[in-house]
Amino acid sequence: MPVGKGPILLCSTADWDNPFWTNKQHMAVQFALHGYQVLYVDSLGLRRPTLASCDLGRIFRRLVRAVPVPRQVRPNIWRVSPVVIPLHGVTALRRLNDCLLIATLRWHLSLLGFGAPLIWSYNPLLHDVIRHLPHRGVVYHCVDDLRTAPGLPGEVIEDAERRFGHMADLCFTTSPSLQRRMTPLFRGTHYEGNVCDVDHFRRAREHPPEPEDLAVIPHPRLLFVGALSRYKVDFSLMESVAQQIPQAHWVLVGAVGEGQPGSAGPPTHLANVHYFGPRPYAALPDYLGHADVAVLPAPKNEYTASMFPMKFFEYLAAGLPVVASSLPALEEYRDLFFPADGPTAFAQAVRAVLEGARRDRKRIDAACTYHSWSARFLRMEKFFSPLLESSHHA
């Protein structure tokens, strides 16, 4: 076993170099910072691919990256990009994928000298693969209701989560809804909501330089940062509020979600809606630091019923007042932001903030400190670290 606290095999649902970092990449970094060694497994393509240029490009890049040795991407973090056929609803192909993946991961674990790692998975479809890998414990980190995401095999995922529950030692969830659904399936389930890099986003409070592309947009500015997918963002609400408050300019930093037509994007035909596209993670505080309101207009659907937006605490750490749809996962934090359901209420909340309405800064700062990556990791570590000390393995 490598020197340190122990090896981690982290099975992600997002590639390491995805421009929008979520729990997967951040948790890999936390493991590394806290003395663990990580083999990060890139996404296995849960969503059925299309002939769109972005999907074809992703397939080509995966073939290029499929080298037979682990690639170090940061201190204590190595990356592997397995080649699989992303048609998980087809039983025969799923079994073929499993055989290829088992061989690939065993080879990489051997090269790194990882022995029997703790397996930390975001992908429930890997239950049969994990059974054939040496390990000292299995953790399922349930951060989304994957059954309800467009383009994913919902029934297959639901069955896989049940099977995963029979073999896993622990499950961590990021919303009360996910916690209620996972509790009957797993032996030990713990709720820890999404968090943020507090120090990084607090830079927005320190008068960072204003990005040139943002400088040409008039105030007041309503800023949204994140994936612009119609099952996550209510574009109809956005359009209505933009029309109700024409003097307020929406600034959208992110990419239109994958797996949906171009016509499903934000209402950029309006003069006060500005689509910027994705920006580097390091630059996000610069944009937040020159906004007036952070917005989170989410639709009501099966996916958002279990969604805890990672941007929520990022917005708060940046010092911005937040107007957001009343998502179930945010219910316990209603005193930290301005909840609003529907275009009229959302517009009223935006107007109130622009007129000076604010939430208590001390309570917000205390919540952000508690909901930092490092603080959450240490709370979670108390539950999973005993697994690395155990002697059982596959």
Image (tube, rainbow, N blue to C red):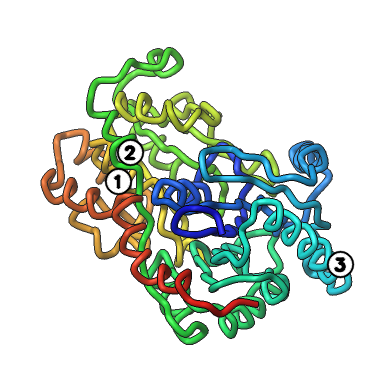
Q: Separation of disc 3 and disc 1 at Cα?
A: 47 Å
* Residue depicted at 54% across the width and 54% down the height: 2
Secondary element under disc 2, as helix, strand or loop, is: strand
Residue at the (62%, 55%) spot, across then down: 13
> Which one is nearer the viewer's eye here, 156 or 291?
156
- Disc number lying in front (2 or 3): 3
Q: In x, y percent, where is residue 351?
A: 24, 38
Q: Quadrant of residue 153?
A: bottom right
- Amino acid carrying mark 3 in the image: Leu
Instruction: Please tell me which of labels 3 and 1 falls first in the chain.
Output: 3
Q: Is residue 357 visible?
A: yes
Coordinates of residue 319 in the picture (x, y in percent):
23, 36
Three-letter amino acid code at the position of disc 2: Ala
Circle number at residue 294: 2
Quadrant assignment, res 376 = bottom left
**How busy is the neighbourhood of tag 3: few (under 14 within 10 Å), some, or many (20 plus)?**
few
Q: Which sits earlier in the primary sequence, circle 2 or circle 3? A: 3
Numbered circle sitting on residue 336: none
Under tag 1, what secondary structure? Answer: strand
Image coords of residue 283 (percent x, y) = 42, 26
- Check whether the beta carbons of the residues at disc 2 and disc 3 lie within 8 A of each other: no
Residue 154 appears in the rendering = no
**Which residue is under mark 1?**
323
Q: Which mark is residue 96?
A: 3
Residue 164 occupies quadrant = bottom right
